[in-house]
Amino acid sequence: MKRTFLKSVAVALATLAVGSAFAADITGAGATFPFPMYAKWAEAYKKETGTGLNYQSIGSSGGIRQIRAKTVIFGATDAPVSGADLDKDGMVQFPAIIGGTVPVINLDGFKPGELRVTGPVLADVFLGKIAKWNDAKLAALNPGKTLPDQNITVVHRADGSGTTFNWTDYLSAVSKEWADSVGKGAAVKWPAASSVGGKGNEGVAANVSRVKGSIGYVEYAYVKKNNMNFLQLQNADGKYVSPDDKTFAAAAASADWFSVPGMGISMVNAKGAESWPVSTASFILMYKDPADKAQSAEVLKFFEWAFKNGKGMATELDYVPLPDSLTAEIRAKVWSQIKK
């Protein structure tokens, strides 16, 4: 069932990527993190309403640039825009979907989730301090496993990325050395001597699948779509967890969305025995006073439909749909600011 479902998503991704089968009724651009979800929603929405979506999966930084240039009706970003910048730009921001970023590896002889890692050790890998898979720190976390004497290649995003923002936000939270020497951001200077960049979640997934001994980070839908190996990760409660919709939902359970202007909260390293440590939301950016009010209204209709009808599709792809209580608040507190 899930395999068939994912094949249909792959078809939808290809269709949206070329932008030929969907009428450009609604235009958006940005984050690659939610792209599989938006593709599936768009496919179903087109069939039901006849309204199409042309979404460019170009990365969060690109999405912010496009909406500021007013070349699209909505932008999408996993690195939330600050309240001050939203006010300056005359925009609103709201979450659309919740998911998780996952450390993925290309290492022969191990099943997905068989190997474990803690946040500080993972940071040392991305810092380049741990350069071989049989390093003593990795071996200590995986007793009884024979790790190979194989070099580690770090695969990272080459473009400005909300996925990178959230990944480096997490590494900064668990490693003072990472926080002090690299920090968090949509684009950072990657310190590991052996590293390679990839464009979008798609490019990172492709490079990890190609390079033996590599490690990277991608949104979980890309893990499933590409049948990738991943590491179990120790969370803030000291428990080792695997990525899925339940562990993403556990991390989001205590989120206080309106505690930050623009709802731009961080869920990394959330407490809870079942919480996935790199759970994140993906956000939508729209103008309060849009130049094309009719098209802006169509965007809201799309997300209204998705919030009501897209929950099952989100779960199939191991994203977490927003609860009805939150979408009601988004309508009342955020969408009400957009002029019709």
Image: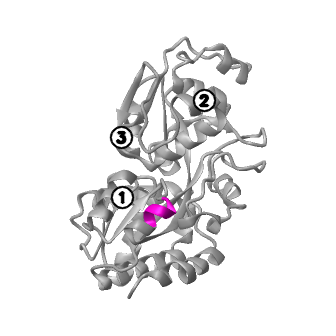
For this orientation, the residue located farthest to the top is 149
* Amino acid found under the numbered disc labelled 3: Gly
Residue 316 horizontal/vertical position (percent): 55, 61
Picture quadrant where residue 121 is located: top right
Residue 9 horizontal/vertical position (percent): 41, 59
Picture quadrant where residue 43 is located: bottom left
Q: Which residue is mark 2?
A: 122
Tell me which label, 2 or 3, sits earlier in the chain: 2
User: In the image, is 198 to the left or to the right of 324?
Assistant: left
At mark 1, the secondary structure is helix
For this orientation, the residue located farthest to the left is 20
User: In the image, is 227 to the left or to the right of 51?
Assistant: right
Q: Dot 3, crowdedness within 10 Å: few (<14), some or many (≥20)?
A: some
Colouring convention used in this rendered image of the protein: one colour
Cα distance in 3D space between marks 2 and 3: 21 Å
Between tags 1 and 2, which lies in front? Answer: 1
* Amino acid found under the numbered disc labelled 1: Ile
Q: Which residue is mark 3?
A: 203
In the depicted structure, whether residue 175 falls above or below residue 93: above
Between tags 1 and 3, which lies in front? Answer: 1
In the depicted structure, whether residue 240 falls above or below residue 280: above
The magenta segment: 82-86
Picture quadrant where residue 186 is located: top left
At mark 2, the secondary structure is helix
Residue 143 horizontal/vertical position (percent): 74, 20
